[in-house]
């Protein structure tokens, strides 16, 4: 799921990115929890890559919307991630695993967390995961 044809300024508009995450949320496969999540990752050139949560009866096989979008970006050769919008019914914050992946792939990203009505708050990856584990932690 990818959106193109926008200027970087249009794509960087938080309301636009939030709207994309809300649209992605409608595609979620959440038959067990009923908790649909959508995500929209903004790349530096204005490309927006979407993701939604995909549940599985074997719960550990479930993947969150944020990680779907982020890994899709990586699969497309993108490393220029500047923002992510995450949409849930109640404005729920990304889980710890997603925070770790965001810190690895887009440590400088702005994060918009929105509810189903499009009300959002703005934060950063660093604010969501202070003192996070990184590749630097693996240096000898």
Image: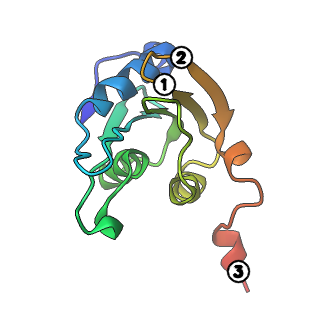
Residue at image location 40% in from the left, 52% down from the top = 67
Q: Earlier in the sequence, mark 1 or mark 3?
A: 1
Residue 28 versus residue 10 in the image, above or below: below
Q: In this view, does 15 lie above or below 48?
A: above
According to the picture, the residue beneath numbered tag 3 turns out to be: 139
Which color scheme is applied? Answer: rainbow
Q: What element carries label 2?
A: loop
Q: For the point 34% across and 50% down, which residue is it?
A: 68
Residue visible at 39% across and 18% down in the picture:
19
Residue 15 sits above or below residue 97 on the image:
above
Q: Earlier in the sequence, mark 2 or mark 3?
A: 2
Question: Would you call the spot at circle 2 few (<14 residues within 10 Å), some (14-19), or many (20 or more)?
Answer: some
State how far apart marks 2 and 3 are (Cα). Answer: 41 Å
Q: In front: 90, or 11?
A: 90
Task: Read off the residue under disc 2.
Answer: 119
Q: Do the residues labelled 1 and 3 touch (CB within 8 Å)?
A: no
Q: In which quadrant is the N terminus drawn?
A: top left
Sort mark 1 into few (<14), some (14-19) or many (20+) by Cα contacts within 10 Å: some
- Residue 77, position as x, y percentages in the image: 35, 51
| Residue 114 shows up from this direction | yes
Of 131 and 74, nearer the camera is 131
Specify whether 89 is left or right of 26: right
CB atoms of marks 1 and 2 within 8 Å: yes
Which residue is disc 1 drawn over?
115
């Amino acid at each position: 799921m990818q959106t193109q044809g926008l200027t970087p300024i249009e794509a960087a508009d938080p309301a636009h990115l939030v709207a994309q995450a809300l649209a992605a949320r409608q595609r979620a496969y959440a038959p067990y929890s009923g908790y649909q999540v959508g995500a929209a990752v903004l790349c530096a050139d204005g490309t927006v890559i979407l993701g939604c949560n995909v549940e599985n009866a074997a719960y550990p096989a479930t993947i969150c919307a944020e990680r779907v979008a982020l890994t899709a970006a990586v699969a497309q050769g993108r490393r220029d991630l500047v923002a992510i919008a995450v949409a849930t019914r109640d404005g729920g914050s990304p889980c710890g695993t997603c925070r770790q992946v965001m810190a690895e792939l887009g440590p400088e990203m702005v994060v918009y967390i929105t509810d189903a009505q499009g009300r959002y708050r703005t934060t950063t990856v660093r604010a969501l995961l202070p003192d996070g584990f990184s590749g630097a932690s693996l240096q000898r």
